[in-house]
Amino acid sequence: MKSPPSDSCANFAGFAGKAASEGEFQAWLAESRTWSEAQLERWGLPACGSDGAEAPWPQPLFEAAHYTLFGGGKRLRPILVRLFAEAAGGSAEGASRAAAALELVHTYSLVHDDLPCMDDDDLRRGRPTCHKVYGEALAVLVGDALLTRAFEVLAGAKGASAAGALQVLARAAGGAGMVGGQVLDMTVEASGASPEDVRDLQRKKTGALLGAACELGALTGGASPVACAGARDFGEALGLAFQVVDDALDITGDAVTLGKTPGKDQALGRATSVTVMGLEGARGEATRRAAAAREAALGLGFLESSLVLRLVEHLGSRSR
């Protein structure tokens, strides 16, 4: 088993009571991504030596899973887990399993979303998608393996919150959460959808897992049930803000910048913020959702740092 990474980096609590400058925020974000990668190296795949005694996966499965899991990305979900754990008085080490588990679930969802039977995408994070490189059958199994691995990793956590953490992840990833959102994404057509239909879809598909990331962080950090619920509400609000920006970028962005094929949702007649409200309407929606996320953050008494507000601003102004 690999030694846990050092917690000596600048953490969320270190900015309590003062405004984080842009330079400080970017340094924190870069370090948080590095930390997130380390947790995936540590817990992500059995053949990485995460637990020492585990049997390795078959080589084709390991190779395809490694290609997908370590293909880049924002690592927003593990960053949120750590951020809320430290804000609640816990440690990065205590949040490591939950952080890896969230990214494993997110990655599995991308593998399955990209399949020809779903979104039929050839490009993800600037590279060919898993099924384009390894075939559809193995891509399905990669997604299955990453999902079950997430629960295996999280089940190994110590402490009284372990069982509750599993329930949080299962609820967010299942039929009432992310999977249900994907079903709505495939079945709700733009021509007959209302703005509230879009919000419900996005609350499930994107908001549920981001809400779980914040809730799991608060839970592993020892926060009260009320604080954990507030953390979840913030994450869901952030997810709605994140997704409407994503919808706009699907129209205004290009494949090189986005790392994926733009315009797919519009071509498929999917219900998105842009296809239902128009581009200008979606931009107004993005502003409202970002304000709601900021308000939710300010309502959490244990969030004493401006980093989370910087994060909302950063995600709202991103170009990819």
Image: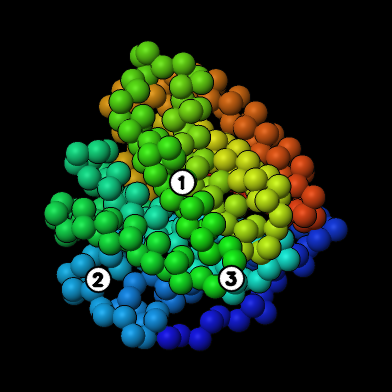
Residue holding disc 1: 171
Mark positioned earlier in the residue sequence (3 or 1): 3
Residue depicted at 36% across the width and 14% down the height: 191
| 46 versus 299 height, above or below | below
Disc 3 to disc 1, how far (Cα)? 20 Å
| Whole-percent x, y for residue 51 in the image | 39, 81
Q: CA distance from mark 2 to mark 3?
A: 30 Å
**Pick the front one: 35 or 224:** 224
Can you tell which of label 1 and label 2 is closer to the viewer?
1
Q: Can you tell which mark lies on residue 62?
A: 2
Q: Which callout, 2 or 3, points at the residue further toward the start of the chain?
A: 2
> Which numbered marker is on residue 251?
none
Can see residue 260?
Answer: yes
Contact check, label 3 and label 1, Cβ < 8 Å:
no
For the residue carrying disc 2, how many other residues have a C-alpha within 10 Å: few (<14), some (14-19), or many (20+)?
Answer: some
Residue 195 is situated, as x and y percent measured from the top left of the image, at: 50, 19
Circles 2 and 3 in contact, beta carbons < 8 Å: no
Q: CA distance from mark 1 to mark 2?
A: 27 Å
